[in-house]
Amino acid sequence: MKILDLINYGTIVLKKSKIISCRLDSELLLSKVLDKNREEILINLDQEICQNYFSTYKELISRRSQNEPVAYILQEKEFWSKNFFVSSDTLIPRPETELMVEKLVKIFKGNKISILDIGTGCGCILISLLSELNNSKGVGIDISKKAITVAKKNAKKHRMIDNTAFFNKSLDSEFNRKFDLIVSNPPYIKSKDLKNLSDDIKKYEPMLALDGGNDGLDLIKKVIYKARNILKFKGMLALEIGNEQYKKVSKILTTNNFRIEHLINDYKENVRCIISTYLKK
C-alpha cells in the first residue's frame, strides 16, 4: 500500500465515526506510525508502506474512531510553539490558554519574577512563561501525582529543570514564600454540565481537572482565597475561567481586595481570563 492509500483508509473510517477532522487526524496518526513529520508524508504520497506499519496504523485509527483525542494517541500536543508530552492524567493544552501566556509575557518581559502555577497539569503554562521570562523561576503544584510526573518530564524536555520545581500538593498546603505572579487554569465546569461535554473530553480527559463543583466556582474561589496569603503586595493573579463566569468571578476578586487589570477574550469573544492585582498589604 502507498501512503495515499493509508490516508484515504483512515479518512473513510474516521468519517464514518463522525470525526470532523478525519483527514487531518489520519495524516497526523500516519506521521506518528512512520516517524516522519506530516509535511514529509504529504510530498511522498506514492511511497510504498510495508504491512507492519499498516497494522499499527489501523490500531491508532480505531482508537481515534472511538473519540480518543489525537493528543493522547500521539502523547504530545503543541503549545507555545513547543511539543509537550501529555497523557490521560493531564488536560490537553488549549490554544485559548496561549492568549493568557502571551499577555503575561508582555506584562513581565524583562522582569525577574517568581511564579506559582496552581493545577499545573502537564506544566505547559509555567514552562512557556519561563521560556520567555529569563532569570525568573516558578513552582507548579497539582493534586495529581501522575500529572506532576508528566510536568517534570516536560521540564526536562524543555531544559527548564533549573527554573522550575513541581510538587504533588494541594492548595491547603503551607507555603513558606510569596510570589509575584500566580497563574491557574482550575476546573470551572459545573458538575451537572459534565455530562454535556463532547465524548473526546468526558470519556478521556481527567474529571479531576474539569469538575468545578455545583456552580463551577469551587476551585476558582479556593485559588482566590489562597492567593491573598501567598501573593506579594501588588502581585498578580491570572485566572482562566469558563463562559459566563466573568461577572461572578470579578465580584469575588474585588471583594477580596483584587483590582482587575486585564480581561482576555477567547476566539469566540468570551472572557476567558482575568488578570488582577492584589492590593492589600
Image (tube, rainbow, N blue to C red):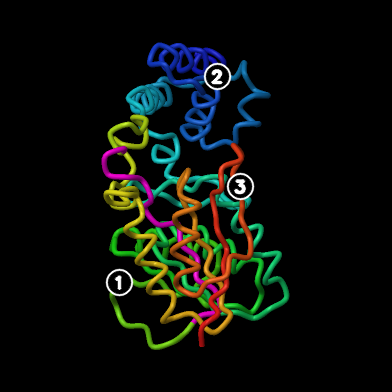
Q: Nearer the viewer, residue 136 or 207?
A: 207
**Image-based side of 52 in relation to 127, left or right:** left
Quarter of the figure with residue 174: bottom left
Note whether 2 is above or below 27 in the view shown.
above
- Judging by the rendered image, the residue that carries numbered circle 1 is 169
192 magenta-colored? yes
**What is the spatial separation of the Cα atoms under label 3 and label 2, in whole angstroms?**
41 Å
Lower sequence index among marks 3 and 1: 1
Q: Could you say which disc has been placed on residue 234 in the image?
A: none
Q: Amino acid at mark 2?
A: Ile
Residue positioned 43% across, 69% down in the render: 140
Note whether 190 is above or below 254 in the view shown.
above
Helix, strand or loop under label 3: strand
Q: Residues within 10 Å of mark 2 (few under 14, many from 20)?
A: many
Contact check, label 1 and label 2, Cβ < 8 Å: no
Helix, strand or loop under label 2: helix
Number of numbered markers: 3
Q: Amino acid at mark 1?
A: Lys
Q: Residues within 10 Å of mark 3 (few under 14, many from 20)?
A: some
- Judging by the rendered image, the residue that carries numbered circle 2 is 3
Quarter of the figure with residue 189: top left
Residue positioned 44% across, 46% down in the render: 92
Note whether 219 is above or below 245 in the view shown.
below
Note whether 112 is above or below 17 in the view shown.
below
Whether residue 164 appears in this view of the structure is no
Q: Position of residue 105 (x, y in %)?
A: 66, 65
Lower sequence index among marks 3 and 2: 2
Q: Nearer the viewer, residue 117 or 50?
A: 117
Q: Which residues are magenta?
A: 179-193
Q: Nearer the viewer, residue 220 or 81?
A: 220
Residue positioned 48% across, 16% down in the render: 11
Q: Position of residue 100 (x, y in %)?
A: 59, 56
